[in-house]
Amino acid sequence: MHAARYRKRLPQLGGQLFLSDAGLETMLSFQQGFTLPSFASFVLLREAQGRQALHAYFDLFARMAHEHGLGAVLETPTWRANRDWARTLGYNALELAEANRAAVALLAEVRASWDSPATPIVISGNIGPRGDGYRADRRMPAGDARDYHLAQVATFAGSEADMVGAFTMTYPEEAIGAVDAAAACEMPIAISFTLETDGRLPSGDTLADAILRTDAETGDYPVYYMINCAHPSHVEPALMEDGPWRERIHGLRANASRRSHAELDEALELDDGDPEALGDEYLALRTLLPRMNVVGGCCGTDERHVEAIARSLAPGPAGKGPPGRGGARQPGAPRA
């Protein structure tokens, strides 16, 4: 009941192409020299220089979407802003809630500059996994996952966030718990699973099974699904199983690198791949993801990659997409 009501409020469900941002943490750490403990970008909200860097980052992608005549879905820099990670970073519960609210407020400032009826901006409260994000070695039952993520989701529900995005989910139970937390707060939620090089979740589940199970156990509550932190060449094997479940996938935020999660964990230098090739690979995936319309980057990507993706999927003549389709008609850090 609540899901149907909230779906009407999310403009990206109409089929227009929406850009997201890129590899926030990799851009901040590798390109701008920020130190991000535990790969947490929300800690930058504490200092003026960090807030300015975050504002400039999101403003860049909101402006890019506006210039292309596209919408934008901006994810708050709160992928690590949950209880366990925050505790290791010295945040108590009140400070953590304030950080999540401050992240939404920052994106609201960006939205005020670029939002328009033709280029709407959606603010998504980003939640990440309780664990590492590359491994599924410590798994919670769905009920425990609901309880774990509820505080962060509730904070977003009391803010200007339009929805919640649960990114880099490595196993179905945590995704189901995040959805249950969102339902309890009457917030729309998108679930973004991550994939290994074989196209399976780190838990070993197939993407099809993960989506079908999450829908079955939550009454189809997620507004849509996404894939993040995997190269398009890792995504394609996951989509070989045909069926209407693929139409539930609206978003893709791919890595620039073809490396596995284990290889990325060990990498000392950034692998930024080939931006133009990445854009072409998004275009090629459109046949397998007919509703893909929320697109951006993840590990190793920056404005060059998102620009290339926009050019590939945007409607002609400026882009490669067919005219009149709003880019990719209805087809994600994240760890980065």
Image (cartoon, rainbow, N blue to C red):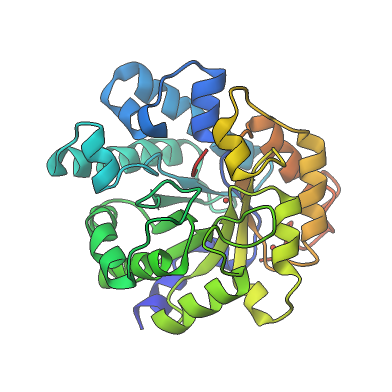
Image quarter for residue 79? top left
Q: How many marks?
A: 0
Coordinates of residue 103 in the picture (x, y in percent): 33, 39
Residue at horizontal 55%, vertical 38%? 62
Q: Position of residue 115 (x, y in %)?
A: 50, 45
User: Picture quarter containing residue 53?
Assistant: top left
| Residue 290 appears in the figure | no
Picture coordinates of residue 215 (x, y %)? 48, 79
> Left or right: 157 with respect to 218?
left
324 left or right of 172 in image: right
Q: Is residue 94 above or below residue 170?
A: above
Residue 214 seen in the figure: yes
Describe residue 277's horizontal placement relative to residue 95 as left or right.
Answer: right
| 122 up-or-down from 171: above or below | above
Q: Residue at x 80, y 49 (%)?
A: 281
Q: Residue at x 72, y 42 (%)?
A: 258
Q: Position of residue 107 (x, y in %)?
A: 40, 40
Question: Is residue 9 depicted above or below 107 in this figure?
Answer: below
Closer to the camera in the image, 128 or 56: 128
Q: Quadrant of the N terminus?
A: bottom left
Residue nearest the viewer, comparing 70 with 224: 224
Is 81 placed left or right of 310 in the picture? left
Of residues 73 and 14, the one drawn nearer to the viewer in this rendering:
73
